[in-house]
Amino acid sequence: MADKGKRKKPRYSGIGGQAVLEGIMMKNKDKYSVAVRTPEGDIDVTVEEYESFAPSKALTRIPFIRGVFNFIDSLILGIRTLNYSASFYEEETDTHKKDKIIDRIFKDHTEKVLSTVTVIISMAFAIGLFVLLPYYLSQLLKNVIVSDTALAALEGALRVLIFIGYIVLISCMKDIRRVFMYHGAEHKCINCIETGHELTVENVRNASREHKRCGTSFLFFVVFISVILFIFIRVEEPVARIAIRLLLIPVIASISYEIIRLAGRYNNIVIRILSAPGMWLQRLTTREPDDTMIEVGIAAVEAVFDWKEYLGKNSDEL
């Protein structure tokens, strides 16, 4: 096993995850776990197989195509596991009665239907807030700013400001701050393994809470790449401008995914420069976890990933 005190060069493990309500989801290939700290103080761990949204697995391996399906899969799995973790803290109310009615209507397809509807609503909200709102706000100044390039740059600046402002705003919410602490625990667990350390509470506590493959970094690249593309890709008609912004979303997501994928596998100067802004933003979306949160993260990892075997195989390179 690796020396716990020495700083190691990170090596890709293939695992990833996200924070949920009072817990952490970890995914390794097609298997994922959700570990939740229950109201009684125990750690509940469940393991499931995830079937990709992609109609064929081959599509999830094609560069610049796989990113679209990975993005949708992340949304679906994220919402599914978030709802699961929230179920531990729900009280028996009228909401449960409504859930039973929905179960009778959709039967075995209830979870898929609700996940799909939630994903659609979430994407519509994100498009409205981060794509359409900056565009319309910039258009208010089109009579003052005559340069199309300057107007597109303003739209991009507004998009970045709205994105950062949104993160800052939600980070003020008490429940979100706890989710961000679990987000920090998730990163620390992965960093602990990928830098060659045994997965113990002490080692995880000393690991970094920032990670290059984080969803925050992915979203930053989505915003940044959209700014660049919208500056150079222009059309005259207002309706066409909106249409091109919507049509480019899958392209932007694909490019962002490929950058994140490279960042997870390489650590050269170019990758570090590209990753730096996203890593900075993670200081907003992660918080230092306490030991009980780290224990939840370790339980989530161990349910789907044999870290001892991983360290043994990579001991010479870590």
Image (cartoon, rainbow, N blue to C red):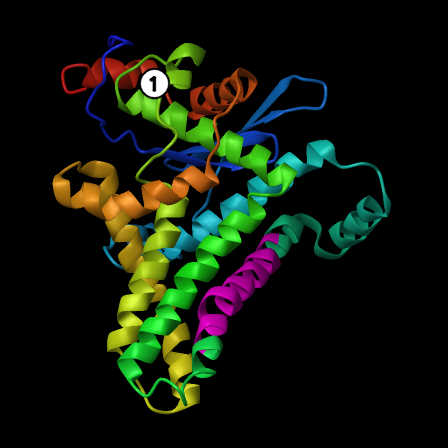
* Mark 1, secondary structure of its residue: helix
Quadrant in which residue 3 is drawn: top left
Quadrant in which residue 122 is drawn: bottom right
Which one is nearer the viewer's eye here, 52 or 96?
A: 96
Residue drawn 42% across the image and 65% down it = 159
Describe residue 98's horizontal placement relative to residue 119 as left or right. right
| Residue 253 place in picture, x, y as percent | 34, 59
Q: Split into 4 quadrants, where in the image is the N terminus?
A: top left
Residue drawn 81% across the image and 53% down it = 101
Residue drawn 67% across the image and 17% down it = 41
Q: Residue 127 in magenta?
A: yes
| Residue 223 place in picture, x, y as percent | 36, 60
Q: Which residue is mark 1?
A: 307
The answer to whether residue 143 of the structure is visible from this angle is yes
Describe residue 301's horizontal placement relative to residue 261 as left or right. right
Q: Which residues are magenta?
A: 115-135
Q: Residue 215 in magenta?
A: no
Q: Is 158 located above or below residue 26 in the figure? A: below
**Magenta stretch mostly in which secondary structure?**
helix
| Residue 114 place in picture, x, y as percent | 64, 54
The answer to whether residue 53 of the structure is visible from this angle is no
| Residue 6 place in picture, x, y as percent | 23, 12
Q: Residue furthest front?
A: 144
